[in-house]
Amino acid sequence: MSQEKLFIIHSVDDLAGPVKYLLDSIGKKLEKSGVIVFLNGPLGSGKTAFIQELARTVGIQGRVQSPTFVLMKKYEVDSVIIPELYTLIHIDAYRLEPHHKETLRVEDFLQDSGTLVCIEWPTAINLDNDLAYAHIDFEFMPKYTGNTELTEELYQERENMRRIKIRFKD
C-alpha cells in the first residue's frame, strides 16, 4: 500500500472528510474497472456509518442499513459528485464463513466499470488482500494517553472518537 491518510472522527458528521477522500481517489479507477474496498475494525467502530455517509454523499435516497442478514445490498447511483460511479454494493461478511466467498465471487465485480464494492469483515471469508484497491481501518481511540488520566469530559469525548486509516494500493 503506497498512499495512506489518517482521520480522527469525533462524530458521524466528521465522516464526510474520509468519504470525500475515498471518492476523490477512486474516480479515475472506476472508469476502467470495478473498485473493491475492504472495511476492517471491531464491532461499533463505524464501518456501516461510513458506508451510510458514502451512500448519502453520492445521492442514494432512503435508508442504508447493514446487510448483515441479507449479505449484500445493491444501490444504483446517478451522482454529479462522482459521475464514474453507477453502482454501490455493500457486503457484510460478519456472519459468513470462508466457503461463502465462492458464492459471493467478489472478484467478478472488478469487471464492472463504475461499480464500487464495500466489504465489511473481509477477513471472515479469507478474501485476498490484493482484491481491494483500498483498505479502510477503523479503530476506537485509546482511553488514556501516556500516564495522564483524562477528565470525565475528555474521557466521554474520547469514547466517541475513532481513527480511520485509508490505504490505497499502487
Image (cartoon, grey):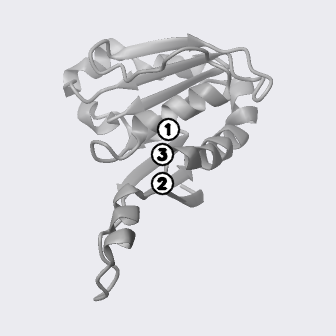
Q: Kindly identify which residue carries mark 3.
A: 135
Above or below, 38 against 138 in this view is above
Label 2 neighbourhood size at 10 Å, few (<14), some (14-19), many (20+)?
many
Asked whether the viewer can see residue 33, the reply is yes
Observer-side mark, 3 or 2, equals 2
Q: Kindly identify which residue carries mark 1.
A: 50
Circle 2 SS class? strand
**Distance from Cα at disc 3 to Cα at disc 1:** 13 Å
Q: Residue at x 32, y 16 (%)?
A: 71
Q: Residue at x 62, y 18 (%)?
A: 60
List the single residue furthest toward the bottom.
Answer: 147
**Distance from Cα at disc 2 to Cα at disc 1:** 10 Å
Circle 3 SS class? strand
Q: Earlier in the sequence, mark 3 or mark 1?
A: 1
> Residue 170 at what x, y percent from top left?
62, 50
> 157 or 20, which lies in front?
157
Residue type at tag 3: His
Q: Kindly identify which residue carries mark 2.
A: 164
**Distance from Cα at disc 3 to Cα at disc 2:** 10 Å
